[in-house]
Image (tube, rainbow, N blue to C red):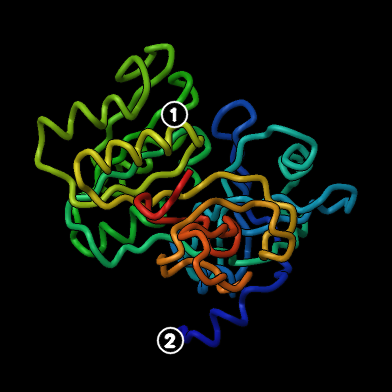
Amino acid sequence: MVTMEMLSAAARVHVTTVIGRRELAPDVIVLELHAPELGLATRPGQFVMAIPPSGECAATALGIYEAEKDRISLLFFVCGKRTSELASMRVGDRLDCSGPLGNGFDISRGTNVAIVAGGVGIASVLLPAQALLRTGARVTLYYGARSSDRLVEADRFASEGCELRVATDDGSNGHHGFVTERLTRDQHAADPFDMILACGPTPMLRAVARIAGELDIPAQLSLEETFACGVGGCWGCVVPLVRSSAQAPSFPPAEQNGSDVVYARVCKEGPVFWAHELRW
């Protein structure tokens, strides 16, 4: 049995080994890692800071895509020097990862759940989808990308038991336009969702928050941000949050008659926040 003490102890630098590498599309990579403690400790929506082996680049935050027993996987888009170095890794290479980090999704509620993923946001939503499906929940994935070839792993989610709704910017697959437009259309025509989970670009998350508010549906948003430290030490990734939130930081201390808004760290208090508690 995994105890809270084990989970806390696991949030450190782990020495992992690459045991598999898949290229899902040009510059879209999945690295499979032998990581026994990470695999056991990871909760849906958490991330790691992956440390490029050369040591010439800072660590980069990557959502944990899969986690099972002695392995995890990281799905990422190549978009710079750090991810290029990670993409060049091969089976047998060593990769140091700090984690698991951050607060993930609350999957203790919801029987008819919409998961909204945009682009690389797909990397953070497989674990919550699997966890919800194990509870017997109905899960519908709304997946948006620039074009059909960027809808990576859509079949994987369908095979897990998710109902699939896709949208592409160029109209090459599914709805021609934003995935949030498809969400709005379906929500008015189908059984109402009782929870929305989302991960993707900030404009998409803002749209999801607006839709959830209009429909009075609780929504959890996994925010995308560039992390410097990943552990809350530098306060470089803050977002406005209502002071009454259970995720509000205790530091800096509240001032008497001060604002009802505080700044929470996406890497520490997040990356997942309740949409209605954010004050963007």
**Which labelled disc corresponds to residue 151?**
1
What residue is drawn where x is 48% and y is 56%? 241
In percent of width and height, residue 245 lies at 41, 65
Residue type at mark 2?
Answer: Met
Q: Which mark is residue 168?
A: none
Kind of residue at disc 1: Leu
Say whether marks 1 and 2 touch (CB < 8 Å): no
Q: In front here: 114 or 251?
A: 251
- In the rendered view, would you say 212 is above or below 237? above
Return the residue at label 2: 1
> In 3D space, how far apart are the residues under numbered discs 1 and 2 (Cα atoms)?
36 Å
Q: Residue shown at 59%/66% (left/top)?
A: 100
Report helix, strand or loop for mark 1.
loop
Query: Which of the pair 66/196 is nearer the observer?
Result: 196
Question: Dot 2: within a 10 Å radius of its alpha carbon, few (fewer than 14), some, or many (20 or more) residues?
Answer: few
Specify whether 237 is left or right of 170: right
Q: Which is more N-terminal, label 2 or label 1?
A: 2
Q: Is residue 201 above or below residue 245?
A: above
Is label 2 in a helix, a strand or a loop? Answer: loop
The percent position of residue 211, horizontal first and vertical second, equals 28, 36
* Residue at the spot 13% in from the left edge and 43% down from the top edge: 192
- Give the class, few, some or many, for how many residues have Cα within 10 Å of label 1's Cα (few <14, many ≥20): many
